[in-house]
């Protein structure tokens, strides 16, 4: 939501910067993006039959959908704030990040209460995914989810690692590892992007794995990898051990690193 709101408010600056639209507007796609962002209804996956809710810009908008006599009213309490606190559709609480088109077509009023800070609204829900719509299996983290660790699925418990420190994490079940992702800790960088090198993180590490036979093997080693901005997630392919059945992985810091999250995945197809 924060990124959508910042893109809406900063990139469509019009006469302030002498450029009204970002990118190529020949086919009207950026006008459409702006209108959807202003309304707070965004078709994230076209053809999926649902709209993702984002913070509206205007306090009240009245739409007149084709094929029905009643208008649709969209009301935003605290319009302009970058997060949604709560949503009601025809007076009933709505707790999902996306709304099916058939609900919008029959609704009379959508009310969103906005907030200056994230509140966790709809955090447990997900919109439709292109990978699912297209029949592609999404990547699934193989690590056992452990609250309060770098395997908490949220990056909410960063760990300070000195050179030589190691973190051992079990897999939910034995499997092969071919891809992993590393996320250093840090606050999201506000737009516009910072000056190059201002918030970069450089780190070196090894990723080791325990096989079902109890042997530790090296899956990968990285030296002076650069993360361009704070909290950037970068994926890496393993360079060895892809055919081994793994029960746990061990992240070994070669340089100091404040680690927010580690994820491991099966080899890509």
Image (cartoon, rainbow, N blue to C red):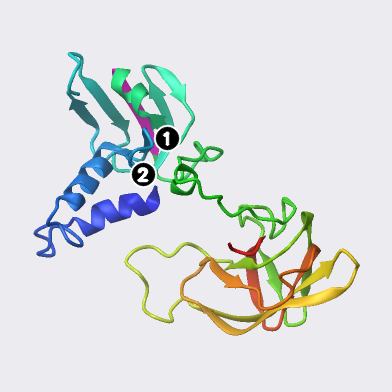
User: Residue 44 has which mark?
Assistant: 2
Q: Residues within 10 Å of mark 1 (few under 14, many from 20)?
A: many
39 left or right of 235 in image: left
Q: Earlier in the sequence, mark 2 or mark 1?
A: 2
In whole angstroms, how far apart are the C-alphas of marks 2 and 1?
9 Å
Image-quadrant location for residue 47: top left
Which segment did they paint magenta?
Answer: 107-114
Give the residue drawn at x 24%, y 47%: 33
Which residue is farthest top?
Answer: 69
Q: Residue at x 20, y 51 (%)?
A: 29
Q: Position of residue 157 (x, y in %)?
A: 67, 58
The residue tagged with tag 2: helix, strand or loop?
A: loop
Q: Residue furthest right?
A: 213
Q: Is residue 59 magenta?
A: no
- Residue 98's label in the rendered image is 1
| Residue 111 falls within the magenta-colored stretch | yes
Answer with left or right where residue 72 lies relative to residue 152: left
Q: Is residue 206 in sight in this rendering? A: no
- The percent coordinates of residue 58 (x first, y second) are 23, 37
Dividing the picture into quadrants, the one containing residue 50 is: top left
In the rendered structure, are the residues bearing label 2 and label 1 in contact, judged by CB atoms less than 8 Å apart? yes
Relative to 192, is 61 on the left or the right?
A: left
Q: In this picture, is 248 found above or below 207?
A: above
Residue at image location 49% in from the left, 37% down from the top: 121
């Amino acid at each position: 939501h924060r990124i959508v709101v910042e893109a809406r408010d900063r990139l469509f600056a019009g006469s302030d910067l002498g450029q009204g639209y970002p990118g190529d507007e020949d086919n009207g796609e950026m006008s459409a993006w702006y209108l959807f962002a202003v309304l707070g209804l965004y078709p994230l996956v076209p053809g999926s039959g649902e709209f993702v809710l984002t913070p509206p810009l205007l306090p009240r908008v009245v739409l007149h959908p084709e094929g029905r006599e009643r208008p649709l009213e969209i009301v935003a309490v605290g319009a302009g704030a970058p997060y949604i606190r709560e949503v009601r559709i025809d007076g009933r609480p709505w707790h999902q990040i996306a709304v099916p088109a058939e609900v919008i077509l029959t609704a009379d009023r959508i009310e969103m209460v906005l907030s200056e800070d994230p509140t966790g609204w709809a955090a447990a829900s997900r919109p439709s995914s292109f990978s699912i719509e297209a029949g592609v299996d999404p990547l699934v983290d193989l690590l056992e989810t452990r609250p309060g660790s770098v395997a908490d699925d949220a990056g909410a418990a960063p760990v300070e690692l000195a050179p030589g420190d190691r973190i051992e994490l079990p897999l939910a079940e034995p499997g092969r590892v071919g891809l992993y992702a590393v996320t250093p800790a840090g606050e999201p960088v506000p737009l516009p992007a910072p000056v190059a090198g201002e918030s970069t993180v450089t780190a070196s590490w090894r990723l080791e794995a325990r096989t079902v036979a109890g042997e530790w093997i090296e899956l990968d080693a990285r030296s002076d990898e650069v993360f361009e901005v704070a909290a950037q997630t970068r994926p890496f392919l393993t360079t060895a051990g892809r055919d081994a059945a793994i029960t746990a992985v061990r992240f070994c810091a070669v340089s100091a690193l404040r680690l927010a999250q580690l994820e491991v995945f099966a080899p890509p197809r």
